[in-house]
Image (cartoon, rainbow, N blue to C red):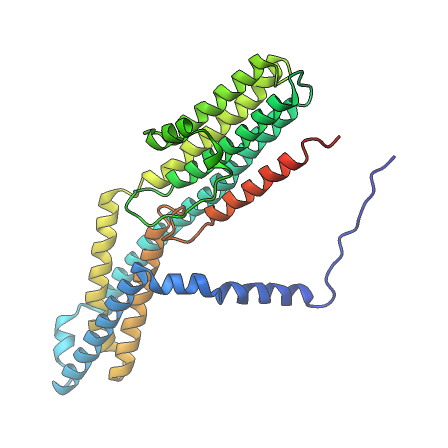
Amino acid sequence: SNPACFPLSKPAGGAGGAAAMVSMVRLLVDRGKFCHMVRSRGFIMSAIVAFLSGVASGVLYYYDSSRGGQFIEKLVPTEVVFNVFITFVALVLGFRTAHALTRYTDAAMYLHKLSACWFDTASTLFSFCRPSKADNEAVDQFQQTLLRLISVTSALSLEALQGASWCPKFRFEVVGLSELDDATQREIVQAEHRVEFVFQLVQQLCVDGMESGVLGVPAPILTRSFQEMGSALLTFHEAKKLALVQMPYAYILITATLLVSEAVCVPFMMALYTRGVWLSFFFSMAVTFFMWITNCVNESLDNPFTIESLALDPRGVQEELNRQLFQLLSQRSLP
C-alpha cells in the first residue's frame, strides 16, 4: 500500500511574513545576549576608541573653523587617497568576517555532529544488549556505566573545545559522575588527556561486555559501535582546530594597524567634509565604532565554542544529550 501523504499547510495571508518578523524582533531584543554583547571587552574597547575618534574630529573641526578652514586642508591627502584607504580597510574586514562566519558554521556542525555520534554509540550498544545471555544485573550494570561514561566524554569534549584554561568557561551537567567508583573518578581527573582516557574506558567496557556475554551480537556487527566511537573522536579532533588554531599573527597585526590608522585618519576627513561640530563628532564616531566592533566580533568567533563569543550553546547541547540518554535508558525494555 502507498504511504499516507500529509499536505503541508500554508499560513493564510501574510501570517508567514508576520511570524518571521516576530522571530526576528525576538532575536534582536534577546536581553541576555544583548547585555552580554554590551558588557564584552570588544564592545567596550570599540566604544572608547570611537568616542575618542569623535571627540578628536569635533575638536579638529572647531580649531579648523577658528583658523578659517585652512588648517586641515593642508594636512590631509586628497579625497581619492582617503577613499582608497577606507575601501582597502573594508575589504580586509570583509575577508575577516567571511573567515569568522565560516568558522562559526563549521563549529555549529561539529557541535551537533559530536553529540549525534555519542548518542548513536550509546543507542547501538543498548540495542546489542537485547539478545544478551547474561543475567539482568550484569546488563543493567553495563548500560548504567556506559550511559555515565558517554555523558562524561561528551562534557569533557565540549570543555576541551573552549580553549585556554584561564578563559571563562561553560559548566556542563554530567549524568551520575559521582556514582562511578572513586578510582575511576580520580583517574579521570588526573589524566592529562581526559577525553581520550574516558574514550578508552568506553572501548574497554565494550570489550569486557563482549567477553562476559552482555553484548550478545557477533563481533563483526559489534564493530559498528567502535566505528561510531571512532567517528566521534575524529569529529572532536577536527573541531579542536577551531579552538587551537588561530588566525596568522601577521594578519592580526596588519588588521590592527589598519584599524588604528583608520581611527586616526577618519577624524581629519570628517572634520573637513562635514558641517558642524556635532556632525563631525557623530560620523567619525559611527564609522570608527562599526569598523572596530566588526573586527572584535570576528575575533570572538575565532573560537565559537567559548562563552565569550556566545555564538553557540554547547551547554544546551550537553543537556539535550543527557535527556536523550535518560530516554534511552527508560525505553530499553520496550518491545
Q: Is residue 8 above or below residue 285?
A: above
Q: Is residue 261 above or below residue 198?
A: below
**Residue shown at the point (41%, 54%) measured from the top left:** 310
Quadrant assignment for the N terminus: top right
Residues 261 and 50: in front is: 50
| Residue found farthest to the right | 1
Q: Position of residue 274 (x, y in %)?
A: 27, 79
Q: Position of residue 27 (x, y in %)?
A: 51, 63
Q: Is residue 59 above or below residue 214?
A: below
Q: 10 left or right of 176?
A: right
- State the image quarter where residue 16 is shown: bottom right
Q: Is residue 134 above or below residue 73?
A: above
**Residue shown at the point (25%, 68%) measured from the top left:** 48
Q: Position of residue 152 (x, y in %)?
A: 46, 35
- State the image quarter where residue 195 is shown: top left
Q: Position of residue 112 (x, y in %)?
A: 52, 41
Residues 114 and 332: in front is: 332
Quadrant assignment for the C terminus: top right
Give the mark count: 0
**Residue shown at the point (68%, 66%) measured from the top left:** 15
Residues 327 and 11: in front is: 327
**Residue shown at the point (83%, 42%) measured from the top left:** 4
Q: 165 left or right of 108?
A: left
- State the image quarter where residue 155 is shown: top left
